[in-house]
Every structure is written in structure tokens, then in C-alpha cells.
Amino acid sequence: PLPCSSFPPRSSRFRPQFVSLPSSSSSAIMTPWIKNYPPFDREAWKTFPSTYMRGAWALTPLCLGFYLGLPWWGYFLVAALTTPLIFAGFMYMGSRLQNPWPKGGDATEWLEFKNPKDAARYKNKRIDMETLYEMYFDQELDFKHPDLHHVLTHRHEFVTFEFSIVGHLKFLITQWVPEVLSHSRRQDTEQVTDHYNRGDKQKITDEGEDDFYGCFLGDRMVYTSGITYTGEETLEQMQDNKLALVCNKIGLKKGDRHLDIGCGWGSLVNFSAKNFDTKVTGVTLAENQVAYATKVAEKWGVKDKVRYLCRDYRDIPDEKFDKVTCLEMAEHVGVKNFSTFLAQVRELMEDDGVFFLQIAGLRRAFQYEDLIWGLFMAKYIFPGADASMPLGWVVTQVEAAGFEVAHVDTIGIHYSLTIKKWFENWRKNKAQIVAKYGERWYRIFHLFLAWSSIISGTGPATCFQLTLHKNLNAFNRKQFITSRLKSESHAPTLPVDGYAKAGAMNGNGTSNGSK
């Protein structure tokens, strides 16, 4: 494990120290880890004819139903069939005709095509992003620069983001739409287990090591955004910051019954039990994650304080919890089941309980790159995560479910740096990954991590942290004055056998050992 320094001083815990950047111009450095980024905004939200598209959605089924002499219920059948086609048509035309790309661009300056015919085709011509990543995955092209992150910071010089009829429309009709409409237990189980059970289970059970996700998540095994206070921390320090921040935001204390929904490899569950002496239940559908988390709990000596349930979130025992956390799992619940999920969480909470929701989201003022990236993610990385929505939608949902929002933070820039460090780890472990899982899996995650680091750092996607509680008159809202405005935190140290060698915590948040 990499060494971890002590947590930031109390004065900085809820006042992040933002990175100082040089004075900016149109081509200045955007962040310390996205250098020489040439900004280019195609603000589709300003020009996209959404009113005409909604009109087409409403009128096309009506006209077809009247022309074909269908009964009244035929309107809904025709609407279901035509809506994806109309959406695809508008996106196809919009991504090509509106906000045209600057003239010029030569894909061959950045890409090395294996087939001379492809090289000739894209000489002095841009390549659309879908074609680029499909050819890269199929080993039909490589990047001339060794650092893919650097290449993608220059993507607007040689790439277009266009909606395709063959690839994107086929994906929407055959996979995305059915998944959004379904979100059955069987579908969710298949998607989660296929994604998160990728590591060697025997190696996890015997050695406590995930040979796939460990290649980029590092020692902490946390697949969610970390938190940076200086921009200079290691990945491990950023995840330590995040775990402590979550516990501070919910006011975790000794004896609390804590439920972590979508617990992953158990990092927050074990951290909570070790540092705050809580009784914690972690829920996940992935057997590999339960095996790994249990192994760590045994090593830390908290096995009697934690309980891991390998089951669907809909099967969580009907118990009461003081604190509930859900970090980047709710996206997979789906739009269809989101309100039901929130109602379930509310029923699981005590009236004075606190709910922490960290959820990946998108910007409402969309650009066409946002669409193409989202379709790529849905196809290759996180199928079924269709509840990644703008903040306004999330707030509306939680308030409709009877929650009050105590506070919200947007941490997209923190996610950018987190993913950049994942990307660096992935590159370092290329030989091991290719030997065990093949070149294609390496390339898929190679592009995913490089592109997503830029996406989350420049606006298309982000991540929200919401601290929630039941909207009851008697709820003690004064507790958030201390945790939020006065910046008084627990500032826990780290477990001896888990992260860095430091003292454990007692229940009131003070250290039993040296920092």
C-alpha cells in the first residue's frame, strides 16, 4: 500500500483549498491535469430544435394512427415505435448540420491506421468518435502519441461527434431502450455481476487481491470519486479524504446502525466500522466484492461489526438504520425505479436519520460530445445506469420522495483527477491486464479512463453529493450548522492493517493513536 499522510487540518475540511491556476485565455491550461486543452464548445442546447422534436413525438403517432385507422390505444403503440426513430433523426441531423465543425483536421496526424485504405480515407479529414473507438478496440488503429490522455485533449482537432444511424440507432433500439423500460431484477443482476465479477474470485478469496479492478483502483479499491484539497494528493489520500468526508457529512458516531447500498468492495463499510465503532450493513450484487470486503474486514478485526449481503437492493431487510449511504449506485436503479428506490430508503431510515447520496450526473446544457460519450458508456462500461441525470432532476425526485436537501456539492473536478490517477495506474499495469484479460479489455478501459477524466473535468459529466433527511418538522436541523458551516470534523486517522499505519478511532471521533 502507498503511504498516506494525515488528513487535512480542521480549518480546511469543509473549505477545500482550490488549485491555483495561471491566468487564463482561450487556449490556457484548464486544470493542472488537463494541459493545453483547446476549448471548443458546440452548445447544442442553444440550437437543438427540441420543441419541434417533441411536436414530432406527439403528432407523428396521431397522424399515423388516423391514417391507418387504428383504435385509440394504437396511438401509444405507434408512439413507442416512432419515438426512438424521431429522436435518432433529430440527433443525426443536429450533430451534422448544426454548429458545424471548423474546416480542416487530419486524423492521420494523431492516428496510425493499420490498413492503408483507412489511412488514405482519413488523410486531411476528421474521423467521427464512434468509428475511432470501435477501430481502436478492434486493433485497426493506434495512437501515434504514447499518452492517450494527451491525444484526447486535442480531439477537437481531428474528431467529430456525430450520431450514427447504423451504430447508435441500433444500440438505442436493441439495447438501451429495452434496458431503460425493464430494469428487472434479472437484468440488473446480469449487468452488475458481469461488470463487477470480472476479477479472479479465487485470487480474491485466497490473497485478498482483485487482479482486474485492482489494476487501476489501487490499494483502497474505491470505484467512486475521491476528494482533493490541494490537487496534489495521491489517489489513496483522495479516497481517504472522501471516506472521512462522507462520515463527517452524515454525522456518524459510535453505535450508529449504518447501511451502505451498493457497497462495492466494502471500503466505506469497513472504514465506518473501524473508525467509528458502528454496526454496518453493506449490500451488493457482486460475489467478488463480498469476498474481497469480507477478507478486509477479517484483516481489520471488524468482522463482528459488519454484515455483507449479496442481494438486490430491493431485498434489503426491513430494518431501521440511523445513517444510509449510497455512493454512485443509484444510477443503476434506473429512471423507472428511482422514485420507488427513494421511498424504500426513506422507510429504512429512522426519523432522525441522515441519507448521503453521491450520484454521477450530466449537464442540462448538453453538447453533442456529451451524447456520444454517454452512448459509449452505456454500451461498454455501465449498461443500465440511465438515472445519471442533471441535478435538477435528482433534487426534484428526492424532494418528491419526502426528503429535504441539507446541502449539495458538485465534485466533477474531483472526479476528473480521480479518474486521471486511475488511468495512470491502468497504463502501468498494461502487461498484466493484457496477459490475463486480453488486448481488447485493456483498450476499452484505456479509452474509457482517458476520455472520462477529460469529460468530468470540462463539464459534460459530473458528480453530485447530496446530504438528505426526512422532511419532518421535528428533525434537528441544527446538527448541520456544526458539520457544514463551522467546519468541525471528526478528522479520523486510518486503520492499522487497511490503509496506512495509524491509530484507530474511538466512537466520538477522536484519535486513540498518533496521526
Image (tube, rainbow, N blue to C red):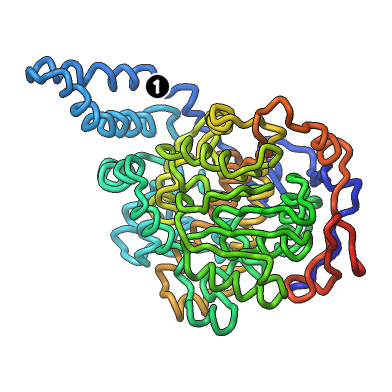
Q: Nearer the viewer, residue 38 or 282?
A: 282
> Where residue 24 sits: x, y (%)?
74, 37
Does residue 168 appear in the picture of this structure? no
Q: Which residue is mark 1?
A: 50
Q: Is residue 318 above or below residue 464?
A: below
Quadrant position of residue 59: top left
> Where residue 143 sits: x, y (%)?
48, 62
Residue at coordinates 75% horizontally, 76% vertically from top-left? 497
Residue at coordinates 67% horizontally, 50% vertically from top-left? 35
> Where residue 291 sits: x, y (%)?
54, 73
Residue at coordinates 80% horizontally, 36% vertically from top-left? 480
Please state which amino acid type lies under the numbered disc 1.
Ser
Query: Quadrant where the N terminus lies?
Result: bottom right
Q: Is residue 42 above or below residue 261?
A: above
Q: Relative to residue 158, is residue 355 drawn left or right?
A: right
Q: Secondary structure at mark 1?
A: helix
Q: Is residue 137 above or below residue 339?
A: below
Residue at coordinates 46% horizontally, 45% vertically from top-left? 333
The furthest residue to the left: 69
